[in-house]
Every structure is written in structure tokens, then in C-alpha cells.
Image (spheres, rainbow, N blue to C red):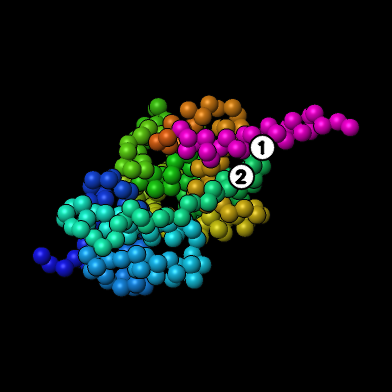
């Protein structure tokens, strides 16, 4: 049998992840990048000769570069998955037990969200006179009004939205279909944006070059707008998703409904991210109300 190296088996493994495990395209792109980095840094190892020394070498390199725990975790999960795939699909006995490769625990990330006043400042700072400004304001309102992931929002076509029911079907994380709901404000901005468009492109959000907008196209807009609005927080599309969920929680929306609206697979994911926020808010209110000397 032909020698199987990381480079030889990568595309087959990635296709398997996409088809059998329903990995999102963004995850496939990330895994492909990590596998190429491994080959560059450690070598295109024959998988049947792979040992724990190779893993240790990778960890040394990543820690020396001061990569984040999350980045290191994805790198290790990627190579661990490739080794398990090779072992199980090809019935090969490996020199390494992939199950012994430990993945660093992800540190709990602080949920960054904007206050109502900051949201309004961000909105008001957007110049909607140029079409790109109107597009950015519309995207902002769609993210705030639906809680969609940016990949879901950018996958929308004009025909995806039922303007009567204010709903749309999207393919979310794990290639799962879900229904998302628009508020009146987001629908209004979508209509304003589409009225200004003169092209036939079916995509809801497009570049000035008439191609479907990508998340990379948006990065600079969010960074620039945050500075214009005078907001000292990192404002990203995911931050607006946190705004959506956080403000629902502050307004006493049940966590089961927030889970559905955000498209979380597990209720404990929703609770893990957002229950601490409401606890902190209530604790502060109690401190102000009851602390008397």
C-alpha cells in the first residue's frame, strides 16, 4: 500500500469531515490551514511512523510563537482527528494512540456586548448616503434583529426572506437548517437597501463589484465604525450576536427560547454564555438596593 502522509491524506479526511461529520465550510478551511502549518513546521510525516514526539515538537513551536490556547487546541484536534481517521478507515496499527493527545481546555471567553446606548451610537455613526454605508447599516440591523451568525447572514439571498412572516430558512452550524426571525427594523432596512440596488445579483449582501459579500470584506468596516462611534470594545459581527442574546436575557426571555433563536444545539451552551450576565446585573441591582449602613 502507498505510504500515507499528512499531505496525501488531508483532502480525503477533509471531505469525510464535510460529508460524514457535517463540518461547516469555515471549519474545513480552518482545518486545511492547520494541516498545512503542521507540514511546514514539523514535516510531512508518514502517518504510520507518527509518534508523540511529533506532537511535542508542534506544541513547542506553537507555545514559542505565543499562539492562543484556542489556536493550539484546533491544531491538535485537527491532527488527532486525522490520525484517528487513518487508524479507523484503513485498519492501521499506529505507533501513537491518538486518544492520548490532550487538547488544552478552552478558557471561558468573556461575552462582549454593547449597551443600548452604545448600540444606538454605533447605528447613528454609520453614513448611509453611499451604498456601502447603507449596506453596512442593513447588515448591522439584520445581525441585531435576528441574532444570526455572520456566515448565515451572508448566505442569504433576496428570495430567502418571507417579508410577510418576517422569516427565513438558513443553514446554520453543523449544516443544520433553522428558521430565523426578523424584527420590523431589520426588514425596513433590507427594503431600503434593496430599493437602492440596480443589479440582478440574487445575494442579499453584495460588494460594490457585485459579488457576494464575505466576512473578510466586513472586518475593516467594523473596526473603522467602532472608532468613529467612540466605542472602546471590540465590535465584530459576533459581538452583535452577543448583543441580541444578552439583551433578550436582560429582558427576562426564557433561556430555552434564546437557545432556539440563537440556533444553539444545547441549552447548556446558552446558559454557560449568558446566565452569568443576568446574575451580575441582578447582583448589582441588589447591591444598590439593599446595601445600607
Query: Could you say where residue 3 lies in the image, as x and y percent from the top left?
Result: 16, 68
Q: Which residue is mark 1?
A: 280
Query: Could you say where residue 235 lies in the image, as x and y percent from the top left?
Result: 56, 52
- Residue 164 is labelled as none
Q: Is residue 272 left or right of residue 198?
A: right
Task: Tell me what residue is drawn at x 12 percent, y 67 percent.
Answer: 2
The chief SS type of the magenta part is helix
Q: Is residue 5 left or right of residue 151?
A: left
Q: Quadrant of the C terminus?
A: top right
Q: Which residue is mark 2?
A: 114
Task: Tell me what residue is drawn at x 86 percent, y 31 percent.
Answer: 292
Query: Could you say where residue 159 lies in the image, as x and y percent from the top left?
Result: 32, 38
Q: Is residue 285 left or right of residue 272?
A: right
**Outermost residue toward the right in this view:** 293
Crowd around label 1: few <14 · some 14–19 · many ≥20 (10 Å): few
Image marks 2 and 1: residues in contact by CB distance under 8 Å? no
Magenta-drawn segment: 267-293
Task: Tell me what residue is drawn at x 42 percent, y 35 percent.
Answer: 266
Secondary structure under tag 2 reads loop
Quick check: can you spot residue 192? no
Q: For the residues marked 2 and 1, what is the alpha-carbon distance in whole angstroms?
A: 15 Å
Q: Is residue 79 magenta?
A: no
Quick check: can you spot residue 289? yes
Task: Tell me what residue is drawn at x 35 percent, y 46 percent.
Answer: 155
Crowd around label 2: few <14 · some 14–19 · many ≥20 (10 Å): many
Snapshot quadrant of residue 209: bottom left
Snapshot quadrant of residue 91: bottom left
Q: Mark 2 or mark 1: which comes first in sequence? A: 2
Snapshot quadrant of residue 224: bottom right
Amino acid at each position: 500500500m502507498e505510504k500515507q502522509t499528512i499531505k496525501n491524506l488531508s483532502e480525503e479526511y477533509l471531505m469525510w469531515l464535510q460529508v460524514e461529520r457535517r463540518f461547516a465550510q469555515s471549519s474545513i478551511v480552518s482545518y486545511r490551514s492547520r494541516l498545512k502549518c503542521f507540514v511546514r513546521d514539523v514535516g510531512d510525516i508518514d502517518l504510520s511512523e507518527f509518534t508523540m514526539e511529533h506532537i511535542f515538537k508542534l506544541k513547542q513551536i506553537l507555545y514559542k510563537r505565543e499562539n492562543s490556547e484556542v489556536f493550539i487546541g484546533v491544531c491538535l484536534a485537527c491532527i488527532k482527528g486525522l490520525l484517528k481517521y487513518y487508524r479507523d478507515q484503513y485498519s492501521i496499527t499506529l505507533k501513537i494512540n491518538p486518544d492520548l493527545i490532550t487538547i488544552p481546555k478552552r478558557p471561558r471567553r468573556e461575552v462582549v456586548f454593547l449597551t443600548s446606548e452604545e448600540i444606538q451610537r454605533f447605528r447613528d455613526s454609520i453614513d448611509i448616503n453611499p451604498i456601502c454605508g447603507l449596506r453596512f447599516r442593513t447588515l448591522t440591523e439584520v445581525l441585531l434583529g435576528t441574532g444570526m451568525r455572520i456566515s448565515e447572514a451572508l448566505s442569504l439571498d433576496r428570495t430567502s426572506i418571507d417579508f410577510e412572516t418576517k422569516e427565513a430558512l438558513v443553514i446554520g452550524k453543523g449544516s443544520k437548517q433553522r428558521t430565523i426571525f426578523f424584527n420590523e427594523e431589520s426588514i425596513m432596512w433590507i427594503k431600503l437597501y434593496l430599493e437602492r440596488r440596480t443589479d440582478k445579483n440574487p445575494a442579499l449582501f453584495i460588494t460594490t463589484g457585485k459579488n457576494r459579500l464575505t466576512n473578510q470584506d466586513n472586518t475593516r468596516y467594523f473596526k473603522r465604525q467602532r472608532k468613529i462611534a467612540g466605542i472602546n470594545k471590540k465590535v465584530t459581527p459576533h459581538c452583535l450576536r452577543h448583543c441580541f442574546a444578552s439583551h433578550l436575557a436582560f429582558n427576562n426571555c426564557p433561556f430555552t427560547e434564546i437557545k432556539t433563536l440563537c440556533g444553539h444545539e444545547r441549552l447548556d451552551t446558552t446558559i454557560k454564555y449568558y446566565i452569568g450576565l443576568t446574575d451580575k446585573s441582578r447582583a448589582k441591582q441588589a447591591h444598590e438596593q439593599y446595601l445600607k449602613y
